[in-house]
Image: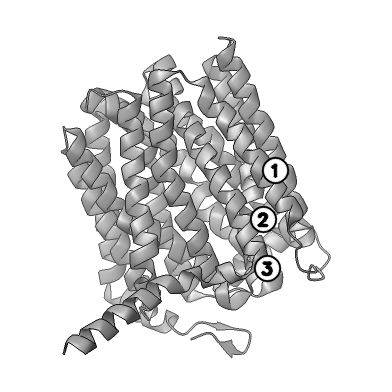
Amino acid sequence: MKENSHKKTYRKLQIIGDNFSVLRVRNIRIYMIGQAISLLGDWMQQTAQAWVVWELTHKATALGLVAFLSQIPFFIFGPWVGAFSDRYDKRKILLITQILAMVFAFILAVLIQTNHLQVWHIYVLAFLLGTVTAFNTTAEQAFIGDMVGTGNIKKAIALNNSLNQLTRLLGPAIAGWLIASIGLAPSFWCNGVSIVVSVICIAIIRSKKEIKKAEGNGLKEFLQGLIFIRGQKLLRLIILFAAIQTFFGLSIIQFLPAFSTVVLNGDASTLGALIGSAGAGALVGIVIILPFFQRIKRSCIAIGGAVIWAGTWYIALSFATVQPLAMLCQFMASLGAANVLTLSIGLAQELTPPNMRARIVSAFLMIILGFQPIASILVGKIADFLGVSKMIRVNGVIMVLFSAILLGIPALNKLREIAETPVIGNRNLT
């Protein structure tokens, strides 16, 4: 009996460790080293930027506007970024976008250091960085797929997201300490330097020979991607769940500076603790829970259940008035929230032919992130009108209700069963 228990434990550890098997690929190891350092700096800058916007304006609407400007490029450039990444060398695209992001970080650092920073500077740079990120994110997701091959895409994306959440745990906490003890500028300087490391790692990667791309204009190729998604029932359903999580769940994170000061009566270190708690929950979710989620045959049930879980804990967060309880709610919500996007993007790539991968990723991101700017503005208005706690409660309720409807309607249940056996070309993927 004891021996069987040991075997089960060993088997579970094998399942958890399986996602790290892609580190055997040299290019992935190099890339992830650069990513880890760069993401740490990125989370430091995001935390510091949110705090400085709140300090300059004390308006949730301003936080929403920064989010709007940073995310609207996904909608504006969505029809072209995927085709652009499919047609050109993804490694070179990543190098250019990272260098531009480094320049923007240093500009913000100088403006803060010299006491010349105004809120409009942040608005302009948020839009510019959002444009760079739109091209970078699409190229990155497809580049990772190219490096590891179709069979290991979900593992590589899970590993990349694990690094994102680990740095999300550490970066905001470091930024909060730096802001409280030294000031705002060091977080931006650190991000700029961290990107230099990422650029070096990308530069020494030897990418595989690019697949020959079909001729055509970007808009036409993007429409081909949308037509492909339209024909894949499973893709359509997981995009719906991902959109609910992004539209209503991601919006909450953007208004944590207001929640930290108005509700919890805290400071920058409080904000760092809340974002770090979310990162800790997401890290645990991706490293420990995700490997088991990936083995669930009915992917839509796993993803929909994760959205409901996250929404429930966001509702609990709306009632929190002390930091420890708020941190617990953030941790628990992120256990599910991180798995929604990780599973969704991984499945989207797995179900896609290699020569269309970047186009599908760009269409996917445009759908789930392109409309996020609208949410940022609306949620900011709601927060200013009702208060940040009630805004969080409304978002959580909507997440739970919408997801429950998608999982519970009989007609959609039948559609979901059909969707479990998607077909690409003549090859059944299940």
Q: Quadrant of residue 303?
A: bottom left
Q: Amino acid at mark 1?
A: Thr
Mark sitting earlier along the chain (2/3): 2
Q: Secondary structure at mark 2?
A: helix
User: Marks 2 and 3, Cα distance to the nearest angstrom?
Assistant: 10 Å
Q: Amino acid at mark 2?
A: Ala
Q: Is residue 11 visible?
A: yes
For the residue carrying disc 3, how many other residues have a C-alpha within 10 Å: few (<14), some (14-19), or many (20+)?
many
Spot occupied by residue 49 in the image (x, y as percentages of width and height): 48, 27
At a point 56% along the width and 25% down the height, the residue shown is 123
Spot occupied by residue 193 in the image (x, y as percentages of width and height): 63, 34
Q: Which mark is drawn over residue 97?
A: 1
Q: Which residue is mark 3?
A: 146
Residue with the most extreme top position: 115
At a point 38% along the width and 27% down the height, the residue shown is 177
Mark sitting earlier along the chain (1/2): 1
Mark 2 and mark 1 in contact (Cβ < 8 Å)?
Answer: yes
- Check the image and report above or below for 136 versus 71: below
Spot occupied by residue 415 in the image (x, y as percentages of width and height): 38, 78
Q: Which residue is mark 2?
A: 139
- Position of 319 with respect to 357 (left or right) is left
- Check the image and report above or below for 163 versus 149: above
User: Marks 1 and 2, Cα distance to the nearest angstrom?
Assistant: 10 Å
- Check the image and report above or below for 157 versus 271: below
Q: Secondary structure at mark 1?
A: helix
- Where does the N terminus fall, quadrant-wise? bottom left
Q: Secondary structure at mark 3?
A: helix
